Amino acid sequence: MIKTALVFLILSMQIAVAQTRQLAYENKVYQQQIKTVQCYNALKEQSLPVIALKSNEQLFFSFDDLDGGSKNYWYTVEHCTSDWKSSRLSSLDYLESLTEDRITEYKYSLGTIQKYTHYELSLPNSQIKPKISGNYLLKVYEDGDQKKLVITQRFYVVENLTNIAIEIVPSQQVALRFSNQKVNFTIAHQVPIQNPYLDLKAVVMQNNNPQTAVINTKPSFIRPGTLVYNELNSNDFPAGNEYRKFDIRSLRFKGENVQDIIKDTALNVILFQDMNTNKAKYSNLIDENGNFFIRNQEGREDRIDSDYAGITFTLNATPPASNGDVYVIGRFNNFALNETSRLTFDASRKRFYGNIFLKQGLYDYKYLWLDKTTGKTDQTLFEGSYFETENTYQVLAYYKKPGSRWEELIGYSSVSNMKR
């Protein structure tokens, strides 16, 4: 009986591991010891990972392994559709050279309580080089076995055949005038697009967050060489509020929003409790639109001498409904709603608590409510939403030539609604 139970437990654990490593075409970490995944155009830290086709631009990709030591990590890339599914192309169609390679750049942490190994990768490189534009998924895995997934990361390769002009205005819907921002844009194209309704898609995102993506398939007006997207009720985004932030560049001295630093066998940082900012008036604060930056004021090399600490978040609020959860989100956790980002409600103190293990640096974050009855999320319940909020918007234009087997990314533009 005991042996049967043990076998069942082992099988259950194997199934759980297999499920967590099932390929998802999104930004995802599949193993708990992997932290601080970064991917951006090397020309600008924490930018959307977009590079121009056949240019000198490169992506910078990195992550930490808290197990330390050195592991045999491999990577490959896969071409995807505009809605992030496999385009089912042969690697010969979209890669110039090899199909996979090993990550050889790594360094061990120096002088940190939490030991880790820092891995880095630049793309394209002499081994892996995309030869067509479009959406791509970078896959990192162990021992050359793609079933042993470690990380998946989206990135974009654009062939600039269009000019995209973006205009951000307050919502034209009366009820949303003071809470939403509307994105109008015009695509001036150099390629002959015979049927824009079938051959072209335009994706709009807010603050580089793929979860906010809206797909546009029908322009409002078609003019020679120009497509106009300004339909009255389309691309209307809740503006939200400026992100909250904290500063743990130093673990000796308290930075912004840090209440206490506890040093023991591990480091713990307690942030000041956050209040519900869903109030009647907007407050102008400078934020980084959800980004994070690894920095260390006491060290020389941020990437390997920055330590890790458990960050305690406290939200002074009560649940807006009986069946739901609160999550703390930002680019540092891919805006993911999982057990790590979920907060626990303390009914006696009427507060939410959570703890996340993060590397030294500067972080933006927000609180989000998930209604488990409807499955809908809401970032405005604890943060508020004001049309004055500074946001960036990204527009990507995808074109599928008649008879072609894949979608090309022929245009990209990113604009802020406010100059600072």
Image (spheres, rainbow, N blue to C red):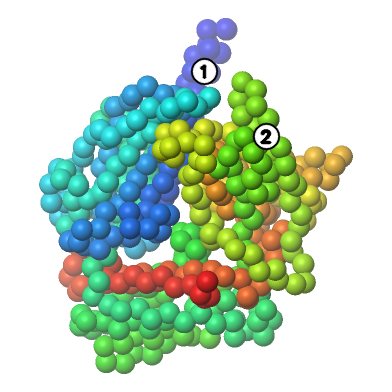
Q: Nearer the viewer, residue 89 or 59?
A: 59
Q: Position of residue 373 (x, y in %)?
A: 68, 53
Q: Is residue 172 above or below residue 31?
A: below
Q: Quadrant of residue 413?
A: bottom left
Query: CA gap, disc 2 to disc 1?
Result: 43 Å
| Secondary structure beneath label 1 | helix
Mark carried by residue 294: none
How many C-alpha atoms fall within 10 Å of the one at disc 2: few (<14), some, or many (≥20)?
many
Residue shown at 27%/92% (left/top)?
224
Task: Mark 2 vs mark 1: give the one in front.
Answer: 2
| Secondary structure beneath label 2 | strand
Q: Which residue is identified by label 2?
A: 261
Q: Position of residue 74 (x, y in %)?
A: 27, 34
Q: Is residue 273 above or below residue 202?
A: above
Which residue type does callout 1 highlight? Phe
Which residue type does callout 2 highlight? Ile
- Mark closest to the chain's N terminus, 2 or 1: 1
Residue shown at 67%/34% (left/top)?
261
- For residue 50, side relative to residue 316 (left or right): left
Q: Nearer the viewer, residue 206 or 11?
A: 206
